[in-house]
Structures are given as C-alpha cells and as structure tokens.
Amino acid sequence: MATTASSSSLSFLSPQPIHPRRVRLPNPPPSTAAPPTPTAVRCTPAPAAAPSAASAASARSIPPPKLVRCPALDRQAARANRLRFARKLLVLLLSKPRRFLPLRVLRRCHRYLGLPPHRRRRPLVPFVLRYPALFRLFQAPTSHPLSPNLSTLAVALTPAAEALAADLAALRGSSELAPRLAAKMHRLLLLAPGRSLLVSKIAHLAPDLGLAMDFRATLCPQHPDLFTFVNTSHGHALQLVDPPPPPPPPLPPFRPAAPSDRLIDRPRRFPHLKLRRGLNLRRAHRDYLLRFHSLPEVSPFEPLDEGASLEMMERRACAVVREVLAMTVEKRTLVDHLTHFRRDFGLPNRLRAMLVRHPELFYVSVKGLRHSVFLVEAFDDDGRLLVEDDMLVARDRLEELVREGKRMRRAKKKGLLALADDSDEDDEEEDGEEQDSVQVDGESWDLLEDGGIGEDWEEVGDLGEGSDDDADAELDALEEFWVKKAVAEGLVDTGSELDAW
C-alpha cells in the first residue's frame, strides 16, 4: 500500500505534466491557425498601390485644423467690431462731396452698414442717434419747405467728425507718411505675379492698410513712376510701370530675438517651435509644424516653379499672408478680405483652414459673424501691439468720439437732456446687431462709385420714389416714429445749425 501510494505520488510529481504547460505559454492560436498563405496572396498587389498609399500618407501628415481660442486677441476683435457701424457710415458720408446722405437713400445700404436683413431689419434712425458725437440729423434744403419727415431728413457729420476726417487727410498727405503708403501699395502689387490688381479688390484692404477710399484719385496720381491704370475685362486695374522694380526683401519680424538664458550658448540639439502663451498642440501637429519650418525660406514676391510640392506652395502662401498682415495698421484683417486675392496671390481655396493650421503664425478670431485673422508675432501675450502704426490715431480718436456720444446719451437718461426711453439697450446689442453678410463687401465699392447714390438732394429725390424699402409699411412706420421723436426732442437741425445738440 505504501509503495503504491508513493508511486502514485511520484507519478504526480513526475515531469510529464510539465510538458502541457509549455504548450499553453504563448497562447499560440495564430501559429496553429495557419492563414498566412491567403494573406500573402492578398498582399501581392501591394507594389501597384504603393504610390496611392504614399499620397494618402502625405495627406494624413497634415493635421486637421483645430482652433484654440486666445482671449487677449479676441478682445481686440471685439473692440474693432464695436466700431464697425460707425466706420462704415463714415466711409459712406465721406465718399460724397457734400458729406451728407438722405435718410431714405441711406436705408438701402442696410446690408453694407451691417443692419439685420429682411424681416429682422430695424429702423436706421436709432442706430444713427447711437453716435451723437459723430452723426447728426438735419432737414435737407428743398425747393418746397416741408415739415421734417422720413423723406426730407438727411444724415451728416458733426463738426468733430469733420475735423477727424480733415486731420486724417492731412496725415496721409504728409511728407512722412505719404511715401510709406505708396510703399505699401507697391509691395501689395508685387505680391501678385502679374504685378496688377483690380481697384475693386484693393478697396477691400484699403482701410486696413491705412489708405483713403479715394486712393485712386489721391495716392496713385502722385506716383506716376510707380503706378498706372489699365482697363481689363473685369474693370479698372492698378498696375506697376514697366519694367517693374526688383522685389524687396520681406518685412522684418516684429518680435525681437529673445536673449538666450542658457549657460552655454550653443545650438539646440532638437528643433524648437515658438508658440504663444497657453497654446498646447498635439504631438502630430507639432511635428508637422517643425517639418514645415525646416523647409527652405520662400520669398512672397517671387512665384514658385511649376513642379513645386504642396508643402512649398503652402510655405509661400503663409509668407504672402504674413506680408499682407504686416502692412496693415492693426496687424489684422478679415478672412473674407484675403479670399478676394486667392487667384492673384496664389492662395489655397481652403484659406481659413490653412490659417488655423498655423497657430504659430496666425490667429483666427471667431468674434462676430465674419472672422478676423491676426499676425501673432506683432502682439505680446497681453494682446498689445509691439510696434504701433502712425495711423492708429484714427482708431483712438474714433473710439474717443464713440465714448463721448455714450456719455451724452447717459446724460440724457439722467435728465440733463430730457429724452425718455432711449431704445439702444446697451453696447452688447451693438455687437449682436452690427453683423455683415459675407457678400456685403462686394457692394461697398459700388456705393462709393456713385452708382446708386447721387451727390445732390435733387438727384436722389427721384430715386426714393417707388423703392423696395417703401413697400415695408411696418418698417416705414417705425422710421417715422423715430423721426417724430427726434424732432420733438430737438435732435434735428434746420440746416443752419452746426451742432446736433
């Protein structure tokens, strides 16, 4: 019995059960399943599909655009958005020789002025009264004296706004600033391979560049050695004279090179990507940007060869956008303004996606209906400009006049000037209501070319009859209500007074 028990125990401890454990170790079903031959057969056409796989891999190397918000630059975009209605109405009034427009004619420009379209449209008079330091209502002179109403009132500039326009015209014509504006126009034309641009397209960027809207009659004739006008099938174009001058170097960077705080001044062992504060990118996006900046430098004034790669084409497109933004006064512009120059400058169709893809160079702000693009290197971490342009005085003085008008409205509400129930419900309403459609800027040049708005009161008197706006009886009733209210409170001049108040 003992021998049998010992033998059974020895049989349990024998090395035979160890062998199955070896079989279970790597969990070998893949080796025993034996489907390698079909996979080898399926992979046989791999050499023929190699080029498409490479192109797909290169396409996947570009990360999808992901927008990371920057509160400091968003505040700058909101700051410019508050002045949009005032700026556009100033442009319309300054484009007329007599500096005024009838109210019923001005109502046709609601899209350009950014007023809500269609049934959401609101009367124009309260928007004008929102800026009493800039605009004033007066009864235009007519052959038959009538009581003030919607058909006889006009909008004009206040003496403060007239002084601001005169000072800006003198500043643009000064001996110090006029050559700089001509140089900006010269560099803008050099960005186009044909060395010419349509005047209607330049008008989109003219205010951002610090140019007057009548640059065609003021700036260009003063430099006949640089510019000339040609007629094309698409309209008048501004062209450089032959032979064109050699292309200049790109504008220098705004941000100075930071001093090295390392103990040993030697080149970095790994590439470094300078990003704004608070911006974190994914590893794939960072690697793509490092590869992008390792490409050779490209001049924005010289076209690429026909066989250039997509990466080099994007490298030049970024250089072109950087050059345009560096020439602007506030180092920002609307993305829609840049899309007008896609064919002229060789920019990609998906321009906004390219701008978002390069947060180290540009920042796209979504404040407002129309997105703005900023040049990141021109701002510090708090959103302040590192180098201020001389034309920034126009924005500062315009903001001061808007604040002065706000103080006047508050004084009225407190009873110093009796006007009950002012309907501009706060500046937040301005941000919500002053919105453009994407197609608005196409109308701006037509309005400034005197195509639909006459220069004299008698000329526009015939245009007002039978207009589309008169068909909206409800809107006309609202306008008449605000006109009567303004007349009752003494906000309408008889034509001889200069001050709106």
Image (tube, helix red, strand yellow):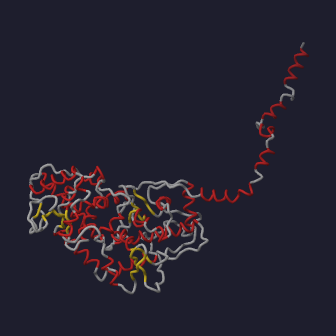
> On the picture, is 119 further left or further right than 491?
right
Q: Is residue 413 above or below residue 97?
A: above
Give x and y (percent) for residue 494: 9, 65
Q: Depth check: give the residue in front, 2 or 292.
A: 292
Please state the total of marks drawn on the protein image: 0
x%, y% of residue 334?
Answer: 39, 63
State the residue lying farthest toward the right: 3
Left or right, residue 371 beside residue 486:
right
Q: Is residue 118 above or below residue 331?
A: above
In which quadrant of the rendered image does the C terminus lie? bottom left
Quadrant hosting residue 161: bottom left
Quarter of the figure with residue 13? top right
Query: As drawn, which residue projects farthest toward the front?
Result: 466
Picture layout, residue 302 above or below residue 360: below
In this view of the protein, which residue sits in the foreground, 233 or 361?
Answer: 233
- Residue 333: where, in percent of width, then height? 38, 65
Q: Residue at x 40, y 84 (%)?
A: 226
What is the quadrant of the N terminus in the image? Answer: top right
Residue situated in front as seen by the camera: 116 or 172: 116
Where does the image place residue 78, in percent across and percent down from the top left? 33, 57
